[in-house]
Amino acid sequence: MFGVVKHKGLIWSVIISSILFTSCGENEQKLETLYNSIKIHGETQGTTYTVIVVEKENTLKKNELDSLFSAFDKVLSTYLEESIISQFNRCQDSIVLVDKSHLFERCYITSQDIYSKTKGLFDPSVFPLVKNWGFMNNKISPLTKKEVNDILGYVSFEKDKHHTMVFSPEGKILGNKYKADFKLDMNAIAQGLSVDVVDEFLKNKGYSNYFIEIGGEVVVRGNNREGNDWRIGVDVPKENLTTRELENIIVITEKAIATSGNYRKFYMKDGVKYAHTLNPLTGFPVQHSLLSVTVIAESCDLADGYATAFMVMGTEKTLSFVKSHPEEKLEVYLLFSGEGGEIERVMSDGFKKYLEN
């Protein structure tokens, strides 16, 4: 979906996956006789996925999951020319599309909600900025102030400004553009939504104990093979680590988790560091000390989208946002660079209960 190399969050950043599964322990062989636990691993969306199901009766097959991902790509992949989103991006003024899965509508409506609540710091129309900065193809391509301002002339997800989108119950989509260069890229929320799609599929099959991870975005339900909540490790946010180091471990179930960061995704030009996280209001890379943000939410599309927005907001504004929007049921764990370059951490009050003692 997102190319050979994981281009997670290509709305305005390439997000580094910072979540690691750490479940089974020394009782693994003993519990194998009690549970029909299976682990399915594969590739999708330019990254990898892992699904672990812990049930006494388990018939899940890899081809079922791959079929889900294939259908998802046909709607939201900007790397497939005939996907719903690619067809909209190519059109010059208006187009009628059909998406009986309603995945595009679902992704669009959730994105509009996050866009509104973050006052434009989450913006799927920032795709032209990401492309011209060179982040889509890993090319070094700094932009001038004039070039950025020119592009910002057709970047805004505000309703009725550069486009309209009308959805019908039958799955028809009427998309209108007022500027031909207006284009969408839902990658900063789509991968989280794909985790939700798998979550709903497993629920419909009657499963209640499982772990889903796609490119670092996670949903956990029920218990692991030890009969406990799932344990999720958060990476140390350092550049060029040869081995993975864990910063902390979350003990959690019945939640979605997403982590965003740009500490390993940037390029250097003439001594200037250009982070892959772009502020869609200014059109330039963010310049603050936040290294990574882990978000716990009720669904993975929300966790994914807000993780991206929070990387733009920075530490203090993120904490303030979470506190002032209790209806979103978000918890955050932020890692940032201190004055001396050391890694410091801060979290929302509700996040503390998930940390392993």
Image: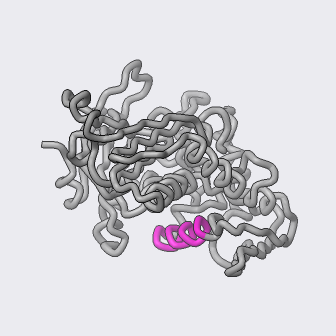
Q: Quadrant of the N terminus?
A: top right
- The residue segment tinted magenta is 106-118
Question: Would you identify the image quadrant in which residue 246 lies?
Answer: top left
Residue 256 appears in the rendering:
yes
338 part of magenta stretch: no
Q: Quadrant of the C terminus?
A: top left
| Residue 16 drawn at (x, y percent) | 48, 39
279 shown above or below 244: below
Identity of the residue drawn at 31% across and 48% down: 334
Identity of the residue drawn at 64% across and 70% down: 105
Identity of the residue drawn at 33% across and 63% down: 330
Q: Residue furthest right?
A: 92
Identity of the residue drawn at 33% across and 51% down: 209
| Residue 36 drawn at (x, y percent) | 35, 40
| Residue 285 drawn at (x, y percent) | 55, 47
Residue 340 appears in the rendering:
no
Q: Which of 352 and 320 is in front in this view?
A: 352
- Left or right: 60 with respect to 141? left
| Callout count | 0
- Left or right: 333 with respect to 200? left
| Residue 35 drawn at (x, y percent) | 30, 41
211 shown above or below 102: above
In the rendered view, how is the structure colored?
one colour
Q: Which of 94 and 222 is in front in this view?
A: 222
